[in-house]
Image (cartoon, helix red, strand yellow):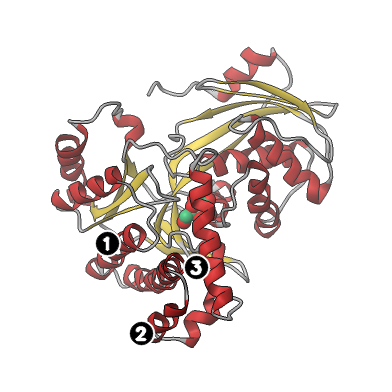
Amino acid sequence: MAAPTSPVDMLANLFGPGAEAAEIAVPGRVNLIGEHIDYHNLAVLPMALQRRIRIAFRHRSDSRIRAASAGGFALREFDWTARLDPSPQGDWANYLKAAAQAVAGKWGPGRGIDAAVVSDLPPAAGLSSSSALLTAFTLALLRANGIRATFEELMEVLPEGEYFVGTRGGGMDHAAVLEARAGAALLIRFAPLSAGPVPVPAGWSFLVAHSLTHAEKSGALMAEYNSRRTAGARALRKLGFDSYAALIAAHDWDSLKGLTAQLNEEEARCCLHVAGESLRVHTAVRAMRAADADAFASALNDAHSSARDLLRISCPALDALVDAARAAGAPAARLTGAGFGGCAVIFCMAGERARIRAALMRGFYASRAGFDEAQHLIDAEPSAGALHL
Ligand code: GLA
């Protein structure tokens, strides 16, 4: 991957000279554990990455929004009105419109911007490049209009804004890319929302490795993602609970398993994944606080099995990647993000990371086409979210 150009230079090239540009940076995130449970209002544990989306922008005096992104996302422009019609599915303008709509829904439409976007965050990898773009553009529009939004206010509008693009995700990605702290994972709770750092113990480290199967969330993957969500919600309704938190509090594992006998097979699998994953998140948090690498690793490994066998969101390339990482000596590896492709997160001791990297290059990537080390194999440093950069 070529070094990203400066967004400020790109802005000047695109729109000519003008007033000094403002800049916003929003990182990607990798989820350590807690997959497909944020939308059921259960706690999750991601961390922000050092890879970011950067936007340089200048406000305008009218309501026009114009933006282009390096990496082949051509210029898009529209007038910022209270109700925006979506562009065709898959068009990146939808992320810009989603941001404009999210801001307009709470604060009303304002003056537009000219913007240039640059990113070193691999797209469609399960690292939240799309939520980072939505978040970055939202922050740019707010700043251009002199609005200071709190974390809670942003969390009211951002996950909702994502629906404009067609996904029905939860709030994990936006919370992580906004509120994470350097050197820590972020424990995010929902209903009520809270987010607090869990420091990564000294000597622990993470790698993010791409399966080379592309998980394009605005494509066919969306239907798969949404079907897991609706099966889990149906299961909950049939069991007579209005939240997974209440279901988990009322039943131990064995009685929950018995209860799922009244569900259809898909609902039972999804329900058991959600409940089990929630318990694993709390185990992993306790393990991280106690610097217990074995307990942390086994929670992550179990999370992969559950995602593969119960929720069925893995794919052969992800399973092979996870196996290769463990064969290379990593204590844990699991798919991360929405699944169906994208990345695995690999947990290891810092002193082992370079060796595991090299083993993956030989054992997994050497035989596969399309590998680009800078995009597909990332040393993940727990980084600050956009509100703390
Ligand atoms: C996507 C969604 C998140 C979350 C994950 C799965 O990244 O945007 O809200 O549901 O999938 O854990």
Mark 1 → mark 2, Cα distance in angstroms: 21 Å
Label 3 is placed on what type of residue? Ala
Q: Position of residue 256 (x, y in %)?
A: 42, 82
| First in sequence: mark 1 vs mark 3 | 3
Residue 67 in sight from this viewpoint = yes
Q: Position of residue 190 (x, y in %)?
A: 58, 67
Mark 2 against mark 3, which lies toward the viewer? Answer: 2
- Disc marking residue 43: 3
How would you rate the neighbour count of disc 1 (Cα within 10 Å): few for under 14, some for 14-19, many for 20 or more?
Answer: many
Residue on which disc 1 sits: 301
Which of the 4 image quadrants contains residue 184? bottom left
Label 1 is placed on what type of residue? Asn
| First in sequence: mark 2 vs mark 3 | 3
Residue situated in front as seen by the camera: 30 or 195 = 30
Q: Position of residue 284 (x, y in %)?
A: 35, 68
In the rendered image, the vertical position of residue 232 relative to residue 2, given as above or below: below
Residue on which disc 2 sits: 254
| Cβ–Cβ under 8 Å for marks 1 and 2 | no
| Cβ–Cβ under 8 Å for marks 1 and 3 | no
Q: Residue at x 36, y 32 (%)?
A: 375
